[in-house]
Image (cartoon, coloured by chain):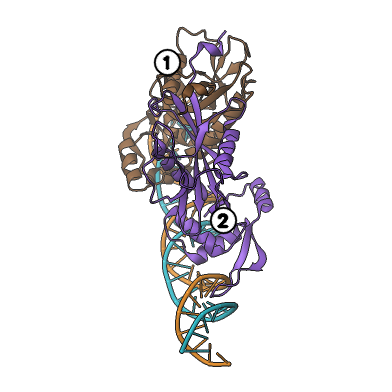
Chain colours: A brown, B purple, C cyan, D orange
Amino acid sequence: MDELQDYPRPSVTIDCVVFGYDGIALSLLLINRKEAPFINMWTLPGGFLFLEETPEESARRILKSKTGLNNLYLEQLYTFGDVKRDPRGRVLSVAYYALVDPRRLELLAGIAANDVKWFESSKLPKTAFDHKEIIKVAYNRLKAKVTYQPIGFELLDKKFTLTELQFLYECILQRPIDKRNFRKRILESKVIKSTGEKRSGQKNRAPELFEFDELQYKNLVKEGFQFKI
Amino acid sequence: MDELQDYPRPSVTIDCVVFGYDGIALSLLLINRKEAPFINMWTLPGGFLFLEETPEESARRILKSKTGLNNLYLEQLYTFGDVKRDPRGRVLSVAYYALVDPRRLELLAGIAANDVKWFESSKLPKTAFDHKEIIKVAYNRLKAKVTYQPIGFELLDKKFTLTELQFLYECILQRPIDKRNFRKRILESKVIKSTGEKRSGQKNRAPELFEFDELQYKNLVKEGFQFKI
DNA sequence: TTAATTAGTGTTATAATAACACTAACTATA
DNA sequence: TATAGTTAGTGTTATTATAACACTAATTAA
């Protein structure tokens, strides 16, 4: 019989690509590394997988400890396994990506402000390990996914205007979207509903506030509905 | 500094979902397990990851040893990491899926015929570990992928007729496709080209033989072309 | 009250998709 | 050698989805 101990085991880490959106630009959360190797370089939030947790649980634990947030949208991205991706030895990384509204996020008090930082996705610093590659894969996945699954809402406040939602999509997809067509489609899809409220206090017409209709979305999915932007 | 040996390491295996198509049905290659646990049950071809190989290299090595084939279409599927997915201990599985024309495949002489077997995907036996779940994820991925990437060709002979290609798509997607629309679209896409030959010796009109135009496909992709069925 | 600013709204041309039925070529056999 | 049986191959049209486009409405500040 094969015994587990007959085979050498790699180390396994979890790395998270955390996307945030502050209303202006898509950003990524990076951590300044305080240890060798790659001391003082920027890295994805990550850590070693514990034996008593699943990779997803591990990702949530790590995100909680680095950002203080739980319950965020999280999805497995890919497992990176180049033999020399970590100079310390053989380390597999199961990568996840997460979506966060950074305005809802309080970076943990215990962590020095300089250690954890948001970077605009177009202005990333040099990163350690193969994290540049992981980020690239994550961004491509986000871009593809956002057009056929209503995950963009995770990056916004609970209540948002259609203009805000459109700006977010333009920001992720890096292309302009026609306002009238966008509104028509998103409203026809029935995945968002009006709250009846308006956002006032601006120097212009008060826009209507909408929210994601999760219940309705689940029903639509059951009927075979496919979200599409 | 973090040292790798400070952290417990899980075992890591590679499991492969091998899809085959014999002209009639989509099939899966399973292996009859000769060891505990799950002795005598059917499993996905798999094995432990070696420290000196990447997960993909490992998958190719495993497939080569179980099927004798190399150079097959292979793609990482997902990493399965339930804490109790293997009764022997903590084992992560990095799963891959592969596409094979089973008529090109000679099962290795060294392996008893009963040990390795094709099963129609609609008539699978009970499988060990969480392999049922892995298979389900793989089939969903294949179904989605086949509509926007020309990977179906991997399951056919180098030269094939349009009718064969259409049957394959109907088989994977589990729905009828209009013959004229299918031909129009696949030919307009330019990813296949006529060989000029015909397949004769049947009791009916000799169909034209086509082949996948890989060079042309790569060019089209560079120009931003998206395959679509 | 007026200017500035962003929100909100429909129509039409164009392109993509889906539905549909016959003729052509080859083989077997009467 | 004519005919029946079988699968290959071919275009057109209606329907639906997409893309392009410009003005009016509401609010605030000056």
B209 to the left or right of A149: right
Position above or below: B120 against B91: below
Discs 2 and 1 lie in a common subunit: no
Mark 2 lies on residue: B156
- Tags 2 and 1 touching, CB below 8 Å: no
**Secondary structure category for the residue under label 1:** loop
Check the residue under mark 2 and report the chain it is in.
B
Which quadrant of the rendered structure holds the N terminus of chain B? Answer: top right
Position above or below: A99 against B29: above
Judged by depth in the image, the label closer to the viewer, 2 or 1, is 2
Check the residue under mark 1 and report the chain it is in.
A
Q: Residue at x 47, y 19 (%)?
A: A49
B196 to the left or right of B129: right
- Using a 10 Å C-alpha cutoff, classify the residue at mark 2 as few (fewer than 14 neighbours), some (14 to 19) or many (20 or more): many
Q: Residue at x 59, y 45 (%)?
A: B69
Residue B209 at x, y percent in the picture: 62, 65
Residue A156 at x, y percent in the picture: 43, 28
**Secondary structure category for the residue under label 2:** loop
Tell which of B118 and A215 is nearer to you. B118
Tell which of A150 and A63 is nearer to you. A63
Residue A180 visible somewhere in the drawing:
no
- Using a 10 Å C-alpha cutoff, classify the residue at mark 1 as few (fewer than 14 neighbours), some (14 to 19) or many (20 or more): some
Q: Amino acid at mark 1?
A: Gly
Residue B84 at x, y percent in the picture: 37, 26
Tell which of A145 and B145 is nearer to you. B145
Residue B52 at x, y percent in the picture: 62, 26
Q: How many marks?
A: 2
Residue B83 visible somewhere in the drawing:
yes
Mark 1 lies on residue: A68
Q: Residue at x 51, y 33 (%)?
A: B47
Q: Amino acid at mark 2?
A: Leu
Q: Quadrant of residue D24?
A: top left
